[in-house]
Amino acid sequence: MIIYGSLVSPFVRKLLGYLGEKGIDFELKGVGIGDPDPGFQAASPLGKMPAMDDDGFLLADSSAIIQYLEAKYPEPALIPADPQERGRVIWWEEFGDTVFAACSGKMFFNRIVAPKFLGREGDLAAAAQAEGEELPKLLAYLESAIPASGFLVGDRLTLADLAVASPLMNFRHCGACIDAAVHPKIAAWSDAILSRPSMAPWIAKEERLIARVMAAKTLR
């Protein structure tokens, strides 16, 4: 199995964690925005990241890939069979992908991707608005919702934890780290999820990548 994507994408990060928790072997081929790699273009005609080539079966989008893999490799189950728990996992993945990641994307793209990867100015006002107005509300909601179990759904790891923890790395790259004094439950929960063996090695690699990029000149 080949996975196409960038380590700094929260959607790729979520999928890599999922694959690790499942114990599924794969090869990661790094691609960027608008990458001309023919394999990536075939698997993702719209350029959506991540994309997958599973022995000739091509698919793009992290949620679509995970649903496919969960059906193909049902154990260990990361999407519960219980109707209520399944519903909550789907909600949390939606929150992570379309709400949390959207907020982190405004900050990460405009502060790091645009100037450092693409060589052009980012919209710093949009990044500041996301950090100052959107992020506090999202963190307050998440802090209130983390149960005593230490997992978002039930008493064990599910896709929900991977999906919501993944965008936190992009906030961290922008300097918006979780203050344990203000959000102690998020701090403890995210540290536990992001330090799992399925996530930690990839995060270490992306942190080295970001460090190299940030050390380079911004715009010429």
Image (cartoon, rainbow, N blue to C red):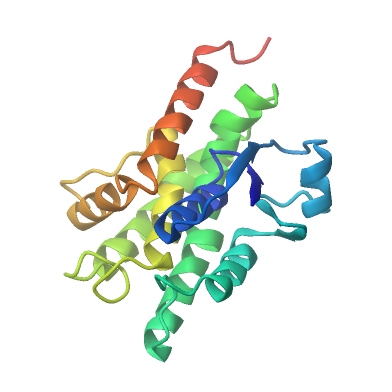
Q: Quadrant of the C terminus?
A: top right
- Asked if residue 164 can be seen in this view, the reply is no
Total marks shown come to 0
Which residue is drawn at the image coordinates 37% and 62% (left, top)?
161
Q: Position of residue 48 (x, y in %)?
A: 72, 52
Q: Is residue 28 left or right of residue 48?
A: left
Residue depicted at 42% across the width and 42% down the height: 169
Residue 51: give x, y in percent of width and height: 69, 52
In the figure, is residue 143 to the left or right of 6? left
Up/down of 67 relative to 119, above or below: below
Asked whether, in this view, residue 23 is left or right of residue 196, the answer is right
Q: Is residue 143 above or below residue 72?
A: above
Can you name the residue that lies furthest to the bottom here?
Answer: 83
184 displayed left or right of 98: left
Residue 24 image offset from top left, x and y in percent? 50, 56
Most foreground residue, 198 or 216:
198
Quadrant of residue 31 in the image? top right
Would you say residue 130 is visible in this rendering? yes
Residue at the image position 52 percent from the left and 48 percent from the top: 10
At horizontal 44% and vertical 38% (from top left) the residue drawn is 202
